[in-house]
Image (tube, helix red, strand yellow):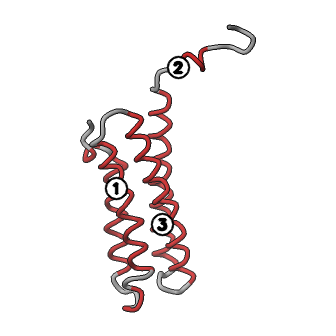
Amino acid sequence: MRDFRKLKMWWKSHQLTLDVYAATAMFPREEMYGLTAQLRCSCASIPANIAEGCGRSGDAELARFMQIAMGSASELEYHLLLARDLGFLGIRTYENLSEKTTEAKRMLSTFMNKLRSSQPISDETKRRPGKS
């Protein structure tokens, strides 16, 4: 079990969530249960899944929750683009949030790669072609 608060990627994704909440505060009222909720949910899912993965036992479960967080970050990318194209987000706000989302995805990817590289090699992967 890891303390998620010690992970830079958790802090960055938590700050991104706070920024998305602030940016969506002025969205049209009719979007409260639409795009506003979708943006907030997909964004909050990133640090929430990092935290949940850290509370699980074993690297395999941790990696699974990091993958879910990555999916949420990809979903957030689309919702940000949609909000920009609908005129709900200004270009500077969109670019800032989009850049932070890309950074979160890079950090998640690096973390998952480190988890994979620390996995023990199974007997199947040790065998060379043509050898029994």
* Disc nearer the start of the sequence (1/2): 1
Residue 78, position as x, y percentages in the image: 54, 69
Residue 97, position as x, y percentages in the image: 45, 68
* Disc nearer the start of the sequence (3/2): 3
Locate the N terminus by quadrant: top left
Question: What element does badge 3 sit on?
Answer: helix
Q: Are marks 1 and 2 in contact (CB under 8 Å)?
A: no
Asked whether, in this view, residue 22 is left or right of residue 130, the answer is left
Residue plotted at (37% across, 91% down): 29
How far, Cα to Cα, is label 3 from label 2?
36 Å
Residue 56, position as x, y percentages in the image: 30, 40
Question: What element does badge 1 sit on?
Answer: helix
Asked whether, in this view, residue 123 is left or right of residue 33, the answer is right
Q: Amino acid at mark 1?
A: Pro
**In this orientation, does residue 107 appear?**
no
Q: According to the image, label 2 marks what residue?
A: 122
Residue plotted at (32% across, 61% down): 15
Locate the C terminus by quadrant: top right
How far, Cα to Cα, is label 1 from label 2?
31 Å
Q: According to the image, label 1 marks what residue?
A: 47
> For mark 3, does the 10 Å Cα neighbourhood hold few (<14), some (14 to 19), or many (20 or more) residues?
many
Say if 110 sits above or below 85 in the image: above
| Mark whose residue sits in front, 3 or 2 | 2
How far, Cα to Cα, is label 3 from label 1?
13 Å
Q: Are marks 3 and 1 in contact (CB under 8 Å)?
A: no
Taking depth in this image into account, of 65 and 17 the one nearest to the observer is 65
Q: Residue 76: which numbered mark, if any?
A: 3
Q: Amino acid at mark 3?
A: Leu
| Mark whose residue sits in front, 1 or 2 | 2
Q: Amino acid at mark 2?
A: Ser
